[in-house]
Amino acid sequence: MRAAPASSGGVGAEQGIAPSLAELVALRGLAQGARPPRRGRLGVSGQGLSPLRGRGMEYAESREYAIGDDARHIDWRLTARSGKPHTKLFQAERERLTLVIADTAPSLYFGTRVRFKSVQAARAGAIAVWAAIRDGDRVAALRGSHRDPPVPPAAGPRGALRVLDALVRWYSAPPADDAGLVVAIEHARRLLRPGSRVVLIADPASVAAVPAERWPALSMHNEVIVLLLTDPLELDPPQAALPFVTAAHRVELDLATAAQRQRWKRTFVLPVDQACAQLPARGVRVHRLSTDAPSQAWLPLLGRQGAVRA
């Protein structure tokens, strides 16, 4: 059962229950201050660069001159400083796509600490968007829906605001037409190009429902990060009777009994543990993002391989 507890345990009356556009825009500083933009070996920054070297538009680095190098590309300043001839290398500039895949399962609209999981999902998505803008990427977003189209790729603050507006709409209340994470991943396959970055934000139960073979297909040519939204009550419930309420009725679970605690663990803890154990082997980086954690806590995973963070 995924209804909010009768006592919301510190979730604010407005802030923390539904995201706002102003809140997501304000996260820009956290994302862009987390680490400097990507830099080459000689300290030159730029957008996502192709590994193909040639006569592109973007300077990559300089190396010692070799027989056959084009004399027009000699780096005269470095040659003068080092006393040895050096030639410039260039790379073709390509804008990478960062795609935010948003799980909108009903189980996310719940929380007992600081904010609902849905609000943390929106904030984490905003962090991903601002980090992408910092790196010169185009940004896009989608969710599991047969009616709601994806937010198309776009660059710069204008593209970012389109995605943030969608996150506010999706996470203010459970959408009536949620088709599940599997549908969202299928939509993503049609949008992605090799070299894209995927930030998938989901409830652990939604991740557990994805067939195992979908993950290698998604991560084979892309950087994939999965953020598992959790709440402290889910992972560490008290050994006591807990009342839950919905619009229709009230339910009380006696978690002091071993049978109920085992059932609780299978429902909430096991999907998290399985995802953290299995996804890295399939090329996916995983981070458990609790409702009471900083929304940018997962950013160190960018550029890391096979990482799992708690």
Image (spheres, grey):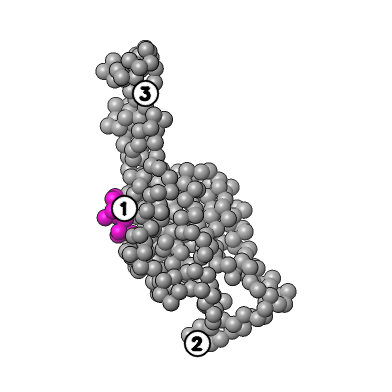
- Cα distance, mark 3 to mark 2? 69 Å
Which residue, given by chain and number where applicable, does mark 3 sit on?
62
At mark 3, the secondary structure is strand
- The x, y position of residue 196, in whole percent, is 40, 46
Q: Amino acid at mark 1?
A: Pro
* Viewer can see residue 6: yes
Q: Amino acid at mark 2?
A: Ala
Q: Is residue 3 above or below residue 99?
A: below
Figure quadrant of the N terminus: bottom right
Relative side of 95 to 108, left or right: left
Closest to the camera, between mark 1 and mark 3, is: 3
Relative side of 97 to 284, left or right: left
The stretch in magenta equals 150-163
- Cα distance, mark 1 to mark 3? 33 Å
Q: Is residue 231 above or below residue 55?
A: below
* Viewer can see residue 214: no
- Cα distance, mark 2 to mark 1? 41 Å
Residue 153: mark: 1
Which residue, given by chain and number where applicable, does mark 2 sit on?
248
Q: Can you name the residue that lies furthest to the bottom here?
A: 249
Figure quadrant of the C terminus: bottom right
- The x, y position of residue 188, in whole percent, is 40, 55
**Marks 3 and 2 close (CB-CB < 8 Å):** no
Q: Earlier in the sequence, mark 1 or mark 3?
A: 3
The residue drawn where x is 36% and y is 23% is 62
